[in-house]
Structure formats: C-alpha cells, structure tokens
Amino acid sequence: MSEPLARSPRPLWPHTDDVVTALRTAGCVFAEEEASLLLAAARTPDELTAMVARRAGGLPLEHVVGWAEFAGLRIEVDAGVFVPRRRTEFLVARAAALLRPGAVVLDLCCGSGAVGAALAAALPGVELHAADLDPAAVRCARRNLAGAGGRVYEGDLFAPLPAGLRGRVDVLAANVPYVPTGDIPLLPSEARDHEAPLALDGGADGLDLLRRVARSARAWLAPGGTLLSETSEPQVPPALRALRAAGFTATTAHDPDLDATVLMATRE
C-alpha cells in the first residue's frame, strides 16, 4: 500500500522582529515603521524577503513598495522616479491657498505628479496640466493624475505644452531641481544612486532651471497668476533677483518645521 503524499509545509512569514532587525542592521533609522509597510505590501513570504533585501541594499522604501505618502495621498512612484519629499507639502499649501474654482494649474517638472495630484485634491474641478522631461516620470504621473483628469506632457519645460494653454495658467508649480552640481555627491545615497540625476541637478549654483522657467513663465501665466518653486535658504537672494529680473513681483515663505522655503512670483 502506497504512502500518502506528504504535504508541503506552508511557507512561514518572517517574524516582524526579524524584518526590523534586518532593516536596522542595514542602517534604516525608522526600521519599525518601514517593517510595517513592507509587511503590508508583500503578498507572499518570498516577496517580503526580496523586498527587505532590496531595502537593506539601499533602494528607497518608496521604490520598494511602489508608492509614497504625500499630502495625505498615496502617490505611485516607479523605480528611478523622484520621490516626493514631505517638505514640498509646504509648496502645495501655499499654492492651494491661491486656487479658485475652475483654476488652471500647471505642475512643471512634475516627476510623479505628486504636487498636481495634491492640488487637484485640495480643490476638485481644477483644470490640471503637468509636464516632465523624464519618460519614466511621465508614465508615473499619468497614472497618478488620471483620476483628476490631468493631462501630462513629455518634454523640456514649456516646450510640450499646447499653445492654447499660453496666458491661461493661474497657478504654476515648478518644483525644479535645485541642488548645485557640486553638491550631488553629498546627497544621501538613496537620492544620489536611485533617482534620476536630471531630477536633482540644478547646475553650478542650483538655479539654472529656475532661471529658465522664470524667463518663459510670464507668457504662460494669466494676469495675476503665480509661479511657485522650492529652493534653499542660501539660494533665496539670487533666486529673487532672477524672478524680479524676469518681471515678477516675488517674495518667499519659509516653514521651519519642514525646513522648506518657497518662492512665489506673481504676474501683475
């Protein structure tokens, strides 16, 4: 009489403490919180093991789980795409305060589309446009903005935008890269090694992209429209000079809790 086939043992999920230990050993400061997110995201024990290994190897948590929390939203973030930072929520708050029903919003250098998605959530019904040079970011932004009816264009700054948008934009959020080229090697490895360089490098003094945006933005803004961009505190004086030289009335706002500085330039 033949023996019954032995049942394969059910795979065991790694214990939470083991995941935390692996992450902490790899240098993850918030190991407990990250372990919870990985456990929630993984569908099988093998997938969890692979995700922990990728995170321990230095891949940003957001790229491991495929999303980032931003302004209360879950934003899809594909591999290599710039991860939205919490400090950028300050830019969203300043931009949201300018929104009116039916406003035309442009999220320039949109990355994953996080800023545009947050503004559309702040005031549903805005006319939302976004653009980025990185094809991977554009694919990601199209998914994140689809629910808000956002239209996403691929190309350099204003170049891919439809001509009919010219002179109609009420709120232009241009979260341009502003890290000076020489400082790129000083960035955390998660950014330096896993995000597209074009999403980080702002040129010699970090303001190359801002200057380019400033030179063209007036033609796209409606009268009274405002350009908002993030920068660092040391860059504020030259950034304001660039905006004012382009014909804007420009000022700044700072949030010490988020360590966030936002430039606001209005077309009179």
Image: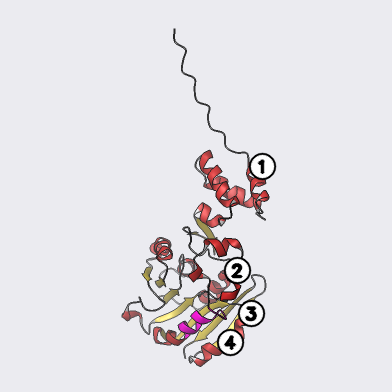
**Residue of label 2:** 185
Q: Nearer the viewer, mark 1 or mark 2?
A: 2
Between 38 and 168, the one nearer to me in the picture:
38
Amino acid type shown at disc 3:
Glu
- Local packing at callout 4 (Cα closer than 10 Å; few below 14, some 14-19, many 20+) is few
Vertical relation: 221 (above or below) 55? below
Which portion, as a residue range, is magenta?
201-214
**Residue of label 4:** 238
**Residue of label 3:** 233
Judge whether residue 248 is colored magenta. Answer: no
Amino acid type shown at disc 2:
Pro
Mark closest to the chain's N terminus, 3 or 4: 3
State the CA–CA distance, disc 3 to disc 4: 10 Å
Residue 133 appears in which quarter of the rendering?
bottom left
Amino acid type shown at disc 4:
Pro
Residue at 58 percent of width and 55 percent of height: 58
